[in-house]
Image (cartoon, rainbow, N blue to C red):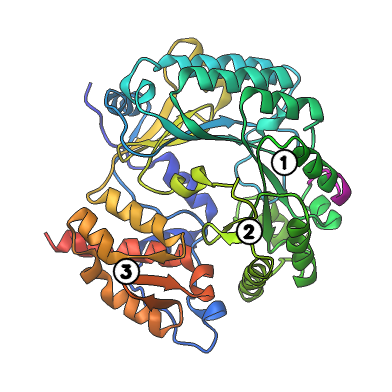
Amino acid sequence: MQPKSVHKSFESSQRSMMGSHVSALEDMVNFEAEITDNPLKNAFRGKATVHTHIPGQSFMGEEAVFVIKNQYENKRNGTSLAYIHVPFCETRCLYCLFYQNPLRPESSRHYTDLLIKELQLWSDLAAQKNEPIHAVYFGGGTPTALEPQDLYQLIKAVRTYLPLANDCEITLEGRIHHFPEEKMEAAFKAGVNRVSLGVQTFNTQVRQTMRRVDDRDSMIRSIEKLASFNQASIVCDLIYGFPYQDMAVWEDDVKTAISLPLDGVDCYQLNVFEKSPLGKFIANGKLPAGADKEERAEMFARSVELLTQAQWRRLSNNHWCQTFRERNIYNRFGKSAADCLAFGSGAGGKLNGYSFMIERKYDEWAKKVEAGIKPIAFASAPNAHWHALRTVSSEMELGRINMRRLSEAYSLPLSTLSQDVFDQWTKAGLITPVGDWMVQTVAGQFWHTTMAQLLVNVLGKRLAQNK
């Protein structure tokens, strides 16, 4: 069967839910930033809120399975990842756009058994059985919603059916609610060596307004308990821009994280998507809008100042570490050209430049797995120069980029084709040239997602014209 393309993909539908400004940024090739006295707040009129998008031909259903299975016949190369999705949550946070399924008493065992079966389906194909995988990420949803024995069995199955590197980073994403000591012990016993907690904020009022369950003291006690095992890197996510979260609350969030026995902290800007519950609450006047763009910019800059003063080490524009135990491998390579195998209802992966999504509808996913069919719902083929463009995008996230080195690595005139872009961004106060390196100022770091999307747009168009 030969694959055929489709006009509307899962990804395009997903992105349309996030707001029209996203697609507008993807189409922009006018890269110029505003020349202003305050580039941190005013460099661009619009701000990208999602990962850089590099579109390609799309496939659905059986055609998608055909396309991706062909890629599975080939060995992977270089740094590789695996993503395991657990699509259940006990409650729905207002700001989350990707809530899938409520957690029911029977969900944990049923899902674990089927997910282990999915891991077995293509385990004899080259892409899954050969070459080491360097980072595994259990994401969701809420992976820590699984029962202790199921969580243990799932992690052990991943270690059985995937060729993990000796130093593989194994991250368990979760929340403190329903994460007792017994479950912590099961995770560490199975081999988890990194725990990423969705704290978002320590402020009890803000947490409960967003329908997060646990209060500040419960969060702190649980983080201290996790750290006491001395078995893993303990990391927490913080988000700035919530309703009722002013600068004083945000400063307290960051200072609280600094004071705790955490190995790392990630600081993200709140994205209020139009069709999320939070977006609807704000539109209906049930909640205030929270920090505007200028206030979020100030919050970002303040977090940089506080973490730098505390001598935390920068891993990327959003990721910081206090100890050398934190490596951040999955996040570092997740947006790059690296391959990522994916398992579980709603998971997304990429292989040899092809992106793919596992069936999101739980019943459909379960039916296909039970029938022995890899439940791939959607796939997208890579465009020309995809590897170079993904690398450019991921390098921008690190706060610096060396276009000369990338030009040499890919035998493409990337430096020449982007020189005017970086010259203009330098004049706008977003970039400081340091030898061959284009280093982002604090303002550039705040705008790096927008800058990466614009740079990829410009390079993609110019490379196509440069044939």
Q: How far apart are marks 2 and 3 (CA)?
A: 29 Å
Residue 72 position within the rendered picture, expressed as x and y whole percent measured from the top left: 32, 25
Looking at the rendered image, the quarter that the N terminus falls into is top left
Q: Is mark 2 on a helix, strand or loop?
A: strand
Circle 1: residue type: Arg
Residue 400 position within the rendered picture, expressed as x and y whole percent measured from the top left: 42, 66
Q: Do the residues labelled 3 and 1 touch (CB within 8 Å)?
A: no
Residue 201 position within the rendered picture, expressed as x and y whole percent measured from the top left: 75, 55
What residue span does the magenta drawing correspond to? 212-218
Q: In this view, does 222 lie to the left or right of 28?
A: right
User: Residue 282 sits in which quadrant?
Assistant: bottom right
Circle 2: residue type: Cys
Q: How far apart are marks 1 and 2 (CA)?
A: 21 Å
| Mark 2 residue crowding within 10 angstroms, few (<14) / some (14–19) / many (20+) | many
Q: Residue at 62% x, 76% y: name it.
A: 294
Residue on which disc 3 sits? 29
Looking at the image, the residue that sits furthest to the left is 467
Circle 3: residue type: Val
Q: Residue at 44% x, 39% y: name it.
A: 10
Which residue occupies the foreground of this view, 349 or 429?
Answer: 429
Which residue occupies the foreground of this view, 143 or 369?
Answer: 143
Residue on which disc 2 sits? 267
Residue on which disc 1 sits? 92
- Queried whether the magenta region covers residue 237, the answer comes back as no
